[in-house]
Image (spheres, rainbow, N blue to C red):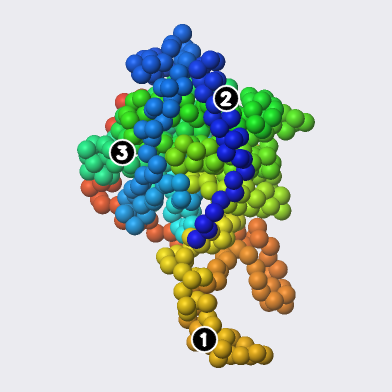
Amino acid sequence: MFHSHVEYLSPDTLNRIHKSSLDLLEEVGVVFRSRNAREVLAEHGARVEGDRVYLPAKMVTSLLEAAPREFRLRARNPQNDVEISPSSFVLAPGYGCPFVLGRSHTRRRATLADYEIFVKLVGSSPHIDINGGIIVEPHDVDPLVRHIWMLYLTLSLSDKCIVGSSMGETGAKDTIEMMSLVFGGHEEVQNRPSVISLINATAPLCYDERMLGALMVYASYAQPTVIASMAMAGATGPVTLAGTVTLQNAEVLAGVVLAQAVHPGAPVVYGAASAITDMRAGTPAIGAPENAIISSVGAQMARYYGIPSRGGGCLTDSKVVDAQAGYESMMHLLAAAVSGVNFVFHAAGVMDSYMTMSFEKFVVDDEICGMVKRFLGLRGAGQEDCFTADEALATDVVRRVGPGGHFLLEDHTLKHHRREFWSPGVSDRSLLEVWRNLGKTDAFERSEHIWRERVAGYRPPRLPRHVDDRLRKYVETRQQELGVKDLLLSG
């Protein structure tokens, strides 16, 4: 396995960012648009003036010490549990996109049927570890119950770890209730990481009521949250990378401190999601190399505090699945991997500056995920021995073949080639004549064929009938309570 990480900044610079962040938290403060959050922080020593909360450095450092270094996130199928720690590399799909790229490269609003397809693609991926969340925003479902139906589809179609709803206190409580139905009661969820969720600050230095409500519910159950800043350098953050990274650090620390104030030891992930602004267009430029720098520094800051990090992803500003989408996505995911990022949102499918998901790009990105995991040595059990075991070093085989020979028919080759060599699904390695005879397809055409084949052949893992019945009953009851008569909206 990959044994070292890129250290983009010196220890002295990390210390300066830390100290500057503490100064911002204590002297400028953070707006928390939740009375409950402000009261909890005040009980731990914060100074509150209206919506603004000033966090003393001593309070921040004390509560940071309560955050765990690692945790195990469980799935419906225990074989799909994942460890999230400063040494892990866990992948989750795209999140929050309102559109889907349709045929002829036309963008359209996402639907619940699109969401179901993406859940199946994640479920059939050998590389992506986490399912669910707002993979796409299904616009044909009433907003009051979207989160419930997305949770139900994810739980019924996949047995991987899942992302919960961050739609305020209500969304988080619905998530906890549904996870309790899956795992056998509230006591089986309390203090056992069973769902992970994304909490976003609003730059600069604000947390809205919805995010705070979700954060406090999850923290009270000791459920992990990815606490992220998405400052836009030059717009909602300073134009200098150092300034935006410092602002990002302060915002993340504020969220981590609240989680620990609610429940000491609540698992958290340091989320570095900030980006630069394209100053010509005034839009986020998520495919820019500067964003990889921000992600890399975020991973360093997370290690500085001894907690896992979030960053990276197969990010691109391209509007179609083209070369730009490929080189930007590979750069960002590989940069995250070598920088020691531990948890990756947007690992597959995202394009168009977080606006659009694509089935074809999902398949291409899934292949990139496999390539990067192979590079890290994460392809399978025993991979660490690939350079250390005597048989892997193959000196006996080299002696036997000798100068001028070949290894094609050696038993050693037949025994090890499948394990040693990663095999692509989208990439074409055939001879030119073979490629021509097979239709001269490009990566986009092959990826379209692959996703359709994967979805058509998908067989959902078994969900016990009594669990499915309880989940359905919960969904129906909540839909009635919220006054939603028709699931799908017309138009």
- Density class for disc 1 (Cα within 10 Å; few <14, some 14-19, many ≥20) is few
In the rendered image, residue 437, in percent from the top left (x then y), is placed at 69, 75
Q: Is residue 47 above or below residue 227?
A: above
Residue at 63% in and 65% down:
427
Q: Which amino acid type is marked by label 1?
A: Asp
Q: Which amino acid type is marked by label 2?
A: Ser
Quarter of image, res 487: top left
Q: Which residue is mark 2?
A: 20
Q: Is residue 420 above or below residue 1?
A: below
Q: Which residue is mark 1?
A: 396
Quarter of image, res 184: top left
Q: Which one is nearer the viewer's eye here, 429 or 341? A: 341
Residue 288 in the figure: left or right of residue 132? right
Quarter of the figure with the C terminus = top right
Q: Which one is nearer the viewer's eye here, 71 or 170? A: 71
Q: Which one is nearer the viewer's eye here, 119 or 392? A: 392
